[in-house]
């Protein structure tokens, strides 16, 4: 039967064919389902009116609940405002039938799940047509439902209100007064738990859609009733409802924390009571804790608010500490084959651990350290091992957030941990080692510099605990954490002892211990660099033996770690020492590469890194191996992430899983990211391999320069799209860093005639491909730090291939710079707003300062790019520069432009000198010129003035301007400009420039004073300039009259006099 006849049948008078079509759409057979989907889409194209009416009819008459549910889902999809939105194509009578069927079905439908689907369909349609007043009956109908005495209708109305608040809240705002009354009445008076939860959901969604805080404040008086929903559910033993209420309140705490502020003491108090109630389910107590931690984390919206409640922080800390006691001494922990085995740890234990970390990061050390100092000693003094263990775990968890404060009390912290190295219980010793490892990372390098003489011997001692391989292996891992933040000078004296212990562990029967030893050796070699040479001959045979012999599946990780260790040792000792072994290692790597490895084999990612390290070590000698290395590397870089998408507010409706959102269970190896309204689950191992591969591509291009040329055609199309790979920051960062490396490789290969016959046209094509892609990615980049890296990479690309850019490309770069400046300014404004919050305190101020420093990075990079563009395009860039000047602060604009133009503008700049001087004068004499936010501009202005004195002296009144410039010196803010300016002064004095010395050498005392400040300052001149200044001072001592000399010296500060005398006499 042809399609037209099938359509006629499906949409004909007999209802059976249509019902069959809908049931086939739910079929588990792919073939049957796709056939039905094709027919359904045909109906949608050819007769949308009949299709919608048919679905509406099914809702009314079909006896099968699943089919009715499917009809509601299909209608919702047809009425969703997306590419296939069909509402405007329907005739008026179909539209009004649909609206009335939907509302009447809500009144008669008895299946709860189906009512909810109908409400979704109504909300979806209403969100498209209500704003244009396309459904005037809907709101009166909803208010009528809410006022009815049917709990089912009340619940339905609230479900629709909640969704409309999310989609089109502004349409509901005019009814704020009526909604307030309705919400208050239902929350206070209804006895039905489902109605109360639906009302709570609607209130919370509505509060979030209100833009003005005064509107939100009108709902303050609902808060006690909102909280009662939770407490009543608990008192009635209805924990499932209580958990729903908690999840809604957590959402409110995250998005509108200040709404809770006036009643914060009551709200937080209730939550802590729930968390402390041992009779409740763990899930309920964990959600109550999550609520309080979420409030603590809501820094951007309610900075400092939770620090005002120290008594609650102390209670919460105590709750979390008690959760850490929920741990068993499980035999499986002791006999484990891998460090990841966490036998005996419960869900209470892991929530306690995670929340201590989050609490410390969000509240900071000044709040948390006093609480910890008060509570931990009792745990350490107790007799139970679980309490010692808990105290050590807690210290490790809070270190990251409390680092600044803990560094001030290092003695106390280190002693606390080291005392537990001798505890009788192996799990306590393990926790002490774990704490030292974590503190080495979070409190380094201070901890390493001050306590190496206590920590390293303690770790070495722990490696002798042969009865407890878990403790030995962990001691080796802690050596890794310690040495990563350590200078070779500190490490070298301990190497004899540590390396010999690690070699003993390498021969241990326990694989976990061997793996720990390998990782530690690798790290020690990496930190001690050439000092490791003396151990090379002892260590390398063991490493090669493992590489060659650890071939069966159970040893895969061991082999992978030996690869890592060999390559890091090779890099540490250098090419000469490593060369012969490198050849052997390469042979093993090549045979491994040829063998079929399983997808989850860890060797792959270790191998990618080992190859790249060998390349760094061997340089151009590595080129012959590239044809082996590159194909699998490209394959890893091109891995498609294993992605599952759900909607961000998905309530895990399994019935909808036939529809757009497939529900995922998030396992340990999955990571979830929220992008807009989508929640995305990704397999992390795939992402990590991809990120490693992209980083390695970048390493090869950087190391091999023109030698990398043959691979550019494959690498560029792999990496350019990854500039917008939002699933993983490391992948984006690597792609960004690679762009200038690829251009540099191509340019060098063409210049050196190694480009297989390609010429500059090829570099232009590559530049046309990469630079616009970088500009476009910059436009969409959400992370400030990566923005700064992108600007840095763009700057390098322009330096490499600038002259090849055409005007439209320069235009797009300039437009993007405007956008970057605007975005950065608006982020700063938001922070300034945050600083006005009622609870804003010094710690928040610190954090904002750190965030604003990232913006400075962005601005510095913008400045660098502008400098590069002016240097590249000289006068032809000036019109663009003028356009940009309104985006830069007036000081910066004047200065950057002029500094660069004075140097490169040449004859074009001559007529502008007068204008330039008055602009610079305005900056230099500005009353706030030396304020911290302006000092860089001031320094650049002084530098620009110096360039005018140097390059355009014939256009100025030098007898006035040169001394004025001298009076601004020295400059101390912008250390790059300082070196340029002070070198210029030095050159002018060396060639006895008459304007700088002045009539009768009257400016000499001033010059000597500037030299003195530069020589006594930090990093204000290059070593070369400094020694030239000292020589000039020695000459002046010889040539100047004694009286002049004496008055010059006396004008200096006493410590400057002393410093100079010692420099001049040495």
Image (tube, rainbow, N blue to C red):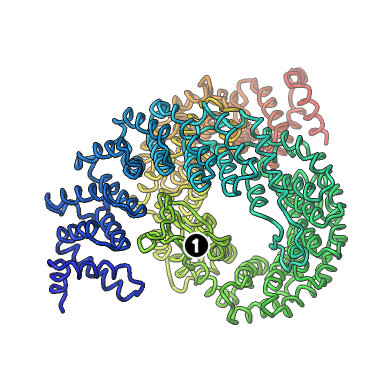
On the image, which quarter does residue 645 sit in?
A: bottom left
| Vertical position of residue 243 compared to residue 734: above or below | above
Name the quadrant of the C terminus: top right
> Which residue is at the front of the view, 766 or 383?
383
Q: Is residue 605 left or right of residue 155?
A: right
Name the quadrant of the N terminus: bottom left
Q: Residue at x 54, y 74 (%)?
A: 632
Q: Which residue is mark 1?
A: 742
Q: Residues within 10 Å of mark 1 (few under 14, many from 20)?
A: many
Q: Is residue 164 left or right of residue 361?
A: left
Is residue 413 visible to us here? yes
> Which residue is at the front of the view, 628 or 596?
596
| Vertical position of residue 999 compared to residue 328: above or below | above
Q: Is residue 75 left or right of residue 12?
A: right
Q: Is residue 181 left or right of residue 934?
A: left
Element class at badge 1: helix
| Count of numbered tags | 1
Q: Position of residue 79 (x, y in %)?
A: 24, 53
| Vertical position of residue 1010 compared to residue 271: above or below | above
Is residue 907 visible to us here? no
On the image, which quarter does residue 287 sit in?
A: top right
On the image, which quarter does residue 309 sit in?
A: top right
Q: Position of residue 440 (x, y in %)?
A: 74, 49
Q: Position of residue 910 (x, y in %)?
A: 41, 34
Q: Position of residue 321 (x, y in %)?
A: 71, 43
> Which residue is at the front of the view, 608 or 70?
70
């Amino acid at each position: 039967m042809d399609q037209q006849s099938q359509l006629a049948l499906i949409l004909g008078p007999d209802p059976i064919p249509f019902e069959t079509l809908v049931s086939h759409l739910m079929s588990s057979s792919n073939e049957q389902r796709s056939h039905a989907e094709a027919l359904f889409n045909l109906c949608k194209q050819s007769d949308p009116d009949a299709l919608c009416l048919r679905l509406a009819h099914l809702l009314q008459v079909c006896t099968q609940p699943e089919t009715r549910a499917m009809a509601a889902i299909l209608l919702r999809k047809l009425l969703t405002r997306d590419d296939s939105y069909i509402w405007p194509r329907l005739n008026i009578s179909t539209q009004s039938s649909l609206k009335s069927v939907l509302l009447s079905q809500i009144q008669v439908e008895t299946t709860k799940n189906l009512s909810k689907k109908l409400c979704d369909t109504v909300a979806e349609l209403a969100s498209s047509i209500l704003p244009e007043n396309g459904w005037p009956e809907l709101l009166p109908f909803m208010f009528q439902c809410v006022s009815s005495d049917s709990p089912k209708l009340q619940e339905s109305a609230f479900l629709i209100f909640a969704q409309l608040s999310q989609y089109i809240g502004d349409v509901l705002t005019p009814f704020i007064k009526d909604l307030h009354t309705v919400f208050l009445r239902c929350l206070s008076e209804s006895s039905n738990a489902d109605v109360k939860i639906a009302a709570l959901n609607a209130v919370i969604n509505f509060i979030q859609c209100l833009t003005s805080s005064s509107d939100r404040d009108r709902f303050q008086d609902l808060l006690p009733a909102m909280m009662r929903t939770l407490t009543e559910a608990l008192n009635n033993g209805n924990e499932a409802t209580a958990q729903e209420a908690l999840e809604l309140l957590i959402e409110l705490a995250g998005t509108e924390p200040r709404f809770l502020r006036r009643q914060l003491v009551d709200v937080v108090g209730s939550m802590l009571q729930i968390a402390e109630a041992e009779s409740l389910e763990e899930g309920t107590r964990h959600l109550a804790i999550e609520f309080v931690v979420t409030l603590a984390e809501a820094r951007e919206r309610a900075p400092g608010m939770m620090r005002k409640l120290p008594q609650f922080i102390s209670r919460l800390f105590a709750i979390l500490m008690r959760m850490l006691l929920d741990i068993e001494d499980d035999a499986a922990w002791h006999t484990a084959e891998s460090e990841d085995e966490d036998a005996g740890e419960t869900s209470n234990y892991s929530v306690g651990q995670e929340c201590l970390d989050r609490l410390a990061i969000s509240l900071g050390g000044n709040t948390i350290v006093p609480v910890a100092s008060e509570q931990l000693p009792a745990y350490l003094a107790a007799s139970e091992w679980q309490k010692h263990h808990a105290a050590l775990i807690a210290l490790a968890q809070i270190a990251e957030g409390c680092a600044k404060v803990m560094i001030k009390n290092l003695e106390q912290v280190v002693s606390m941990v080291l005392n537990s190295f001798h505890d009788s219980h192996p799990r306590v010793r393990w926790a002490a080692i774990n704490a030292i490892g974590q503190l080495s990372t979070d409190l380094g390098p201070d901890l390493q510099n001050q306590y190496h003489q206590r920590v390293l011997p303690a770790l070495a001692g722990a490696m002798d605990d042969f009865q407890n391989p878990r403790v030995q292996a962990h001691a080796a891992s802690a050596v890794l954490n310690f040495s990563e933040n350590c200078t070779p000078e500190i490490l070298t004296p301990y190497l004899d002892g540590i390396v010999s212990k690690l070699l003993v562990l390498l021969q241990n029967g326990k694989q976990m211990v061997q793996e720990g030893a390998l990782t530690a050796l690798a790290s020690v070699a990496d930190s001690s660099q050439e000092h490791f040479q003396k151990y090379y001959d002892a260590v390398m045979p063991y490493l090669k033996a493992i590489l060659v012999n650890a071939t069966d599946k159970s040893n895969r990780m061991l082999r992978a770690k030996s690869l890592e260790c060999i390559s890091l040792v090779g890099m540490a000792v250098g090419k000469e020492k490593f060369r012969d072994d490198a050849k052997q290692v390469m042979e093993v790597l090549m045979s491994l590469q040829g063998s079929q490895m399983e997808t989850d084999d860890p060797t792959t990612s270790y191998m990618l890194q080992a190859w790249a390290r060998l390349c760094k070590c061997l340089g151009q000698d590595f080129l012959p191996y590239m044809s082996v290395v590159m194909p699998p590397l490209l394959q890893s870089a091109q891995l498609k992430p294993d992605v599952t998408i759900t909607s961000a507010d998905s309530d895990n409706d399994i019935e909808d899983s036939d529809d757009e959102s497939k529900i995922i269970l998030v396992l340990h190896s999955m990571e979830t990211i929220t992008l807009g309204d989508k929640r995305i689950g990704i397999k992390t191992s795939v992402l990590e391999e991809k990120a490693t591969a992209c980083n390695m591509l970048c390493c090869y291009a950087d190391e091999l320069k023109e030698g990398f040329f043959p691979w550019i055609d494959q690498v560029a199309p792999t990496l350019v799209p990854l500039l917008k790979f939002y699933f993983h920051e490391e992948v984006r960062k690597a792609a960004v860093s690679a762009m200038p490396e690829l251009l540099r490789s191509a340019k060098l290969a063409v210049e050196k005639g190694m480009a297989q016959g390609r010429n500059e046209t090829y570099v232009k094509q590559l530049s046309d491909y990469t630079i616009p892609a970088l500009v476009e990615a910059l436009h969409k980049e959400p992370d400030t730090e990566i923005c700064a890296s992108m600007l840095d990479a763009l700057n390098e690309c322009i330096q490499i291939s600038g002259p090849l850019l055409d005007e439209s490309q320069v235009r797009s770069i300039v437009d993007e710079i405007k956008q970057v400046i605007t975005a950065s300014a608006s982020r700063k404004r938001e922070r300034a707003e945050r600083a006005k919050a009622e609870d804003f305190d010094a710690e928040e101020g610190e954090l904002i300062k750190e965030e604003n420093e990232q913006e400075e990075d962005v601005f510095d990079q913008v400045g660098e790019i502008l400098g590069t563009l002016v240097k590249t395009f000289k006068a032809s860039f000036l019109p663009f520069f003028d356009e940009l000047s309104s985006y830069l602060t007036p000081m910066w604009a004047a200065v950057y432009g002029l500094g660069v133009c004075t140097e490169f503008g040449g004859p074009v700049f001559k007529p502008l000198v007068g204008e330039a001087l008055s602009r610079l004068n305005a900056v230099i004499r500005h009353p706030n010129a030396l304020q911290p936010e302006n000092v860089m501009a001031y320094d650049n202005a002084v530098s620009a003035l110096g360039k005018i004195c140097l390059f355009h002296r014939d256009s100025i009144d030098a007898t006035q301007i040169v001394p004025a410039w001298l009076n601004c010196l020295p400059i101390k803010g912008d250390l790059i400009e300082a070196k340029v300016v002070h070198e210029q002064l030095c050159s002018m004095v060396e060639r006895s420039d008459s304007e700088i010395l002045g009539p009768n050498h009257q400016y000499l005392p001033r010059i000597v004073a500037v030299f003195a400040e530069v020589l006594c300052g930090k990093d204000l001149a290059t070593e070369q300039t400094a020694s030239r200044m000292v020589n000039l001072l020695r000459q002046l001592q010889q040539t100047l009259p004694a009286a002049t000399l004496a008055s010059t010296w006396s004008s200096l500060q006493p410590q400057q006099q002393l410093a100079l005398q010692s420099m001049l006499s040495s």
